[in-house]
Structures are given as structure tokens and as C-alpha cells.
Amino acid sequence: MIKVSLPDIQAAAQRIAPLIHHTPVLHSESIDAIAGCTVYFKCENFQKIGAFKMRGASNAILSLSAEERAQGVATHSSGNHAQAVARAAKVLGIPAYIVMPETAPKVKIEAVKGYGAEVILCPPKLKDREAYLAEVVSRTGAQVIHPYDDERIIAGQGTAALELLEEQPDLQIILTPVGGGGLLSGTAIAAKSLKPGIQVIAGEPLGADDAYRSFHSGKKEINTSTNTLADGLLTNLGDRNLEIILQYVDDIIRVSDEEIVQAMRLIWERMKIIIEPSCAVPFAAVLQQKERVAGKKIGIILSGGNVDLAKLPFR
Amino acid sequence: MIKVSLPDIQAAAQRIAPLIHHTPVLHSESIDAIAGCTVYFKCENFQKIGAFKMRGASNAILSLSAEERAQGVATHSSGNHAQAVARAAKVLGIPAYIVMPETAPKVKIEAVKGYGAEVILCPPKLKDREAYLAEVVSRTGAQVIHPYDDERIIAGQGTAALELLEEQPDLQIILTPVGGGGLLSGTAIAAKSLKPGIQVIAGEPLGADDAYRSFHSGKKEINTSTNTLADGLLTNLGDRNLEIILQYVDDIIRVSDEEIVQAMRLIWERMKIIIEPSCAVPFAAVLQQKERVAGKKIGIILSGGNVDLAKLPFR
């Protein structure tokens, strides 16, 4: 039973406004010429902390009661969600406890510490992360902010699509990447509620295609191993996210790492903006499916721009 | 005797409007915190062909008579000016002849050809370039479009500062990079005419510091050799450009390649936009002169974003 609806997303938009950027929507004639359609890019790479994750984390934390908030918030993540929770907590003046794998890049650990969060390092396996998080919660009483399988997170992530459709109400297709499914499920609810005729499509890396398989089998499939440079999309779908995706999403398109790098390079070269590999996945799907999108008006949510400049995939 | 004034720049702005982007002005809280001042970036990296050069080339070509235009335009350049002339000529439906050194990156030669220009390859020395250009002109009757030492080019480049000051009229300092001096001289005339109290400052690479030396000696000094990764700023100042710089510019600050890469990295990481090394030079100057700029409201013209992604200076 899905508990997120358009009014929740609209309320989230109002709630998080002071904590986030209203990001620009960009358009490029040269990209349109290459893609054979008109593409509007919602630039969450320009969002606070460099990714859309700031929206969901802000909404989840702002939805806590004053008593809950006072105890602080906790999560486990090595990526953009960790920074989002840490930053939102800092702005709101509450403690944040972030469990991160010892294997996480030092620069990411330092970024989270830079927001004043307490970082707890743990072995990299999921069960270790969960055990360490449980320990932190029992020690501090902090509220756990899950990265995607949470109604407040889903509503928060859906606010990017709300802004995009406000600026470009005639979109015929809207695309996002899919990892845990927070952005995709929030986008799907927002878009289909505002515009039932719109198509909602996700791009997913071939090397971590649990969402594609789940979408087609109708039940939760998992990645037993992953192999893609789109390191933000390795997780399996959350339960709430899967339910929403099965109800609202029209298709999931898988793309190779080669297609991801090609799409990323085009956006870097033609638009002069920095996006991370995971973020290039929906545009890679558009380039793969040229006949299907030909002449259409398309929106893509550019999910984030946090890359390690010393380790870029260009040759 | 300087023949470029504010009305020329205002006329250029009207003339070139159909051929260029009105580029955005971006601002970043995290950049401000690092720099200790408020910085507004005029994003000419988002300009057509990825650089401000589109402004001057468009103005120069549009200033030709119908008869002159019909014969076509010619220039020698291995960089952004070549693409700007080729693109403006294509849009206006006239021939373009671009003399390029055989040593130019293949991708740049292909880009110029992609705009339908005739590319004439020549040995890389300046005297060969000039000889080949003279030959093309005698063969075709084309009009030569100089990259910087030309009143029409100077007026065109000045339009970026016009737009920036329209959006941010309270700037106390405005900065550009300096190579041949087209952007700096146009910016200086526009800014000092609109706002006599504003300071106009240039950043220049230590390894090609002819403008710094000319500024202090009061006469044209040249680079006998150059050594910097800011490959857009290797040329010596033009005569007209020097005259304007001596009259209007307040200071020229030299920066090392290390400072350039550090400034470039900060803009890439914090703003998620792509700028070329030459473009990072004025922000490097700001970071070097923190005391001088402390608390001030500063405008920087980001000159361009054309980089070879396979050869980035980050480690």
C-alpha cells in the first residue's frame, strides 16, 4: 500500500525550500541535434552537496518531531546520501552519525566530517554496516534516515520532477537513473499525478540490473554481483520503491558502461557541466533508443556531479 | 588613438544578439567562503563554440559590408577564434578560410571543418601562418578577421562585461585573463565607461607574462619563449590592446601553473562546470590576492570551457 501522493511531494517542496537550491533546467541545441529530440536537463548536479540526495534527506529530517530531532540522525552510506544527511543536520544544528565503510575514499569521509558529523568506520559488508548502525542508534537514540526505502525520502526526491514539470509542463517522457529507487519512485508519483499521459522511464547499468529484472518479474530480484562504473547505482531496489515502480513506471532501459561514458562525455563536452557516471545513465538510454524518442520533448533529471577528478573514465 | 567607446560596445551587443547566447551569471556560496569575497562568474564557457570569442568574431563579420561579406572571411588560429569565425560565417552563409598549424589537435581541425569552413594547414611558425593567410586572401579576396588587434573584435568582446554589469551593477572589481588582450581591452572600456570607480584587473600566466611586463614598462614587450598550460594565453598583446590596457587597466597579476590548476579544480569541484586552464587564471589571481579582495564584490569573466578530456591536469 503506497503512502506517498502528490500532496506529500508538494508539502515536501515547501518544507525543504530553505535547505536546497531551486536548480536550473538546461537545454542544448547541439545535444538535441545528436539525440534527435528536445531534451531538458534538470541540473541536480548543481544541488547542495552536488546531488539530488539533499532533497530527500532534508525532507526526512524536517519531518521528525522536535524531540526526535534533538537525539540526532544516523545512516550508513559511502556516497551522496551520507553528505546530504550530514549537511542537513548541520544546517538544523542537530547531531549526525554516519556509518561509512573503511574502504570509502578519504575525500568522501573528510567531506562528511567537514559538515561536523561523527563518522563511524566499519568493514565494507552490508551486514557490518547494519550492525554498526544499530549500535550507534542504541548508543545515541538517533533516528535512522534510510537512503531510499522511506516515504519521506521518496517524497523529497519527487520534488525535483515537480520543479522540472513546472518549468516544462509539456514533457512527453521523463527519465531518471535507478539504483535503490528513491529518485525514480518519487519522480514517478509526481509526474504521473500531474500528467497521467507522461511516460516515466529509468536508465539502469547492465552490470547492476536488479531493477530491470524486478520490473519484468514483478518481484524483488537482487544483484548477486555488480560490474559497472556507475557506482551510485549498485544497490538493490527498496521494497517501497519496487511497489511504486511496478505501479507507475513505463519502462527500464539497460545501458552498457561504454554507452554511459559516451553519454557522459557528450554532456561534459557539449554542455560544459560536470556529471557523475551514474548521472549519465538516462541520457545513455535516450541515445540507445533514438527511434522511440525521435522528435519528442523529454526531461532528464541529472542526478549528481560528484566525481573524483583524478579518476575520470575518458581516454 | 583609441577608436572603441561604450556606444560601439552597445551597438555590438545589439548586432550580435541573434548569433550568441546571453550567458548566465553564476555564484557559489562555497567559492565565496574559500575566496573571502563575493564572486559572480559570467559563464562564457557556456557561450556558442564554448568561448567568448564568438562575440568578437560575430561583431567583426556583421560589421562588414554586404560586398565584403560575400567574398568570405579568413583568419589564422588553432584555437577558439578559428571555431568562432567558422561558426559565425556558417550561420551567415558566407565562406570561411581558416589557416591552422599542422600541429593543431585533430579534434579542433575537425570542429572547424564541421562548421563548413575550408581549413588550410600550414607549418606552425607565426611567419608561415601569416604567409599562408596572405596567400588565401590574395586567392579569395576574403576579409581578414584578426583574433584581437581589431576595433570590431574589441567591441564584441566588451559585450560580456556589459551583460555582467547589467546583472550585477555593484561590482567593485572585474577580472579577465589576458593573452592577446581582446577580452581585457573590451572589458576595460565597457566597465570603466559604465562605472569609472570599478577596478579592472587581469590575470596572466607567469610563463607568458608579456602583458605584465608591457603594463609596467609602458611599451610592447614580447614573450621570447612561453611555458604554461594556459594554452589560450600564449600570444603577445596587440598594439590596440596595449594602448587601451595602459589607459584603463588597474593591474595585472601573474599566477603560476600550480595556482591555475588549483583554481580550475575548485571551480570544477564546487561549481560542477567545465572551464579550460586559461579561464581559471583570473580566479587564481583572486585566490593569490586574498587580502586585496577581502569582502569585496567581484566579477570574473569565465572565458571558455574547451578542454581535451583525455589530457586533464588533475592528479
Image (tube, coloured by chain):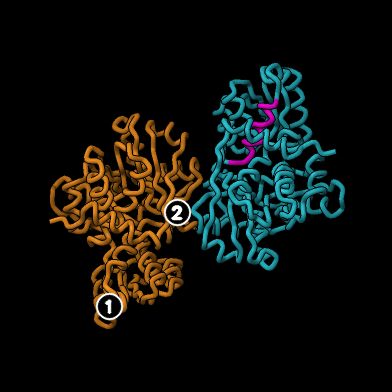
Chain colours: A orange, B cyan
Q: Position of residue B265 (x, y in %)?
A: 55, 58
Nearest to N terminus: mark 1 or mark 2: 2
Q: Which mark is residue A67?
A: 1
Which amino acid is tagged 1? Answer: Glu
Q: Where is mark 2, residue-wise?
A: A46
Using residue A294 as the reference point, say whether residue B106 is left or right of it: right
Q: Main secondary structure of the magenta part?
A: helix
Q: Nearer the viewer, mark 1 or mark 2?
A: 1
Q: Which residue is found at the position 62% from the left and 20% from the top?
A: B94
Query: Is residue B295 positioned above or below B148 on the image?
Result: below
Mark 1: few/some/many CA within 10 Å (<14, 14-19, 20+): few
Instruction: Spot the residue most to the bottom.
Output: A139
**Quadrant assignment, res B263:** bottom right
- Chain for disc number 1: A
Residue A106 makes an appearance in the image: yes
Q: Which residues are magenta?
A: B51-63
**Quadrant assignment, res A120:** bottom left
Label 2: element kind? helix
Label 1: element kind? helix
